[in-house]
Image (cartoon, helix red, strand yellow):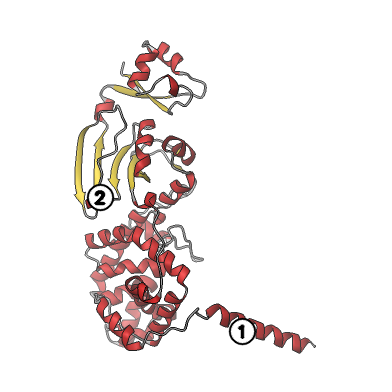
Amino acid sequence: MKKIIASIAIINFCLNISYAKAPGKPFATADHVLEERIQLLDGEVEMRLTNLVKTKIIEYTTYKRGAERIIKKSKLYFPIFERQLKKYGVPAEFKYLPIIESNLKTTIRSRAGAVGLWQFMKGTGQAYGLQIGALVDERMDPEKSTEAAAQYLHQLYQEFNDWTLVLAAYNCGAGNVRKAIRKANSRAYWDLYGYLPNETRSYLPKFVAAAYLINYFEHHGIAPQTVDDDMVNTISAKIFEELDFQAISEASGTSVEMIETLNPEFIKGFIPESTGNYLLTLPSKDMSAFLTNNYSAQVVMSSLPASYVRDVVVPAGVSFTNVEQITIEPRVAIKISSASISEQFDLHRLHKKETLTHLSQRIGISLEQLLDINDLDQSDLNELPQYIKIPKR
């Protein structure tokens, strides 16, 4: 009886595995078509069709829901990847690397402790300037982690002078690639392939499959999901004082969930006090409301491509001076000086039970004058901003 039960369990297990891996439709793309498409990708990394590459392509194109999520996120992150990679002379095809590292998930953490889009270990991330601590983990910051990865890839190329070997070294470390080169007595990737760690041998096939997916998904009936406009149309601002996400949400009208999504590096739900080291990213439509309540913040970057950049967001009634606009493809960085505010006013943080009437009496001006300085009226008295401008003494 026990043998029968065991046999049934094994059969069920095998059926479940078969069912889980069975695609909705048989993979019908001929090998010569796959080979032709791969050759058209044409990059610095050596791409070719092998049995393992085909297996990985089938995996990526079969599970359509996951593929659709990846393609959706690629529209969000690829502009960042392309700009930073170009800045450090790294071939554009390395934008596919985070697909195999993290499935383009900013907060993903491996069992070994690697974190973020580029799966940096703590030591490597810190070596390339990323802040990693209990409050902030910049491995989850798409912008900063990508710049660190581009620097790392550039350094690997300085050693190996071969981008396919750089890809392998990113996975298993430069030491293992050096060891494989010595054993194979060759620097050609396919000569030393058999001397690389098992995981690394499947790394290039995964990379080729990821590149194939992004470029040919339409041939496999995959329809990418639409990217939320609030995720694409964003503006970032330097933050100096400690701010929690709930307060940011109340000031800007952005949901806490959206703030968390756009600012994954702040792992405790607030931005620590700093000298402007940290950026808050919000949907462009909400930044004006946030700045109205936080005059010390400085807008520094818009995520919109240059052809779509709108005017700088400035709170109504506030006159900014020394505005400098610097074009950086495909983004526009906008630096705003707060000199015009600091020369005339101090920022006063309202205490819990403090009213504007009490404040105006204490500093010796009328309530109407205080409201006018802050572009407020009587209807705003029940929902006051956290900081109030007051005339310098």
Total of numbered circles in the picture? Answer: 2
Asked whether, in this view, residue 377 is left or right of residue 19, the answer is left
Asked whether, in this view, residue 273 is left or right of residue 302, the answer is right
Q: Disc 1 designates what residue?
A: 14
Q: Is residue 286 above or below residue 385?
A: below
Which residue is at 26% across, 53% downward?
305
In this orientation, which residue lies closer to the viewer: 180 or 225? 225
Q: Disc 2 designates what residue?
A: 308
Residue 216 sits in which quadrant? bottom left
Which residue is at 30% across, 26% downward?
317
Which residue is at 28% across, 27% downward?
341
Residue 358 showing in the rendered view:
yes
Amino acid residing under circle 2? Tyr
Residue 94 sits in which quadrant? bottom left
In this orientation, which residue lies closer to the viewer: 384 or 174? 384
Residue 314 on image: x %, y %: 29, 34
Residue 146 on image: x %, y %: 33, 59
Asked whether, in this view, residue 318 is left or right of residue 103, the answer is left
Residue 264 showing in the rendered view:
no
Q: Earlier in the sequence, mark 2 or mark 1?
A: 1
Q: Is residue 28 above or below residue 384?
A: below
Whole-number angstrom distance, CA of label 2 to CA of label 1: 53 Å
Amino acid residing under circle 1? Cys
Which residue is at 47% across, 49% downward?
267
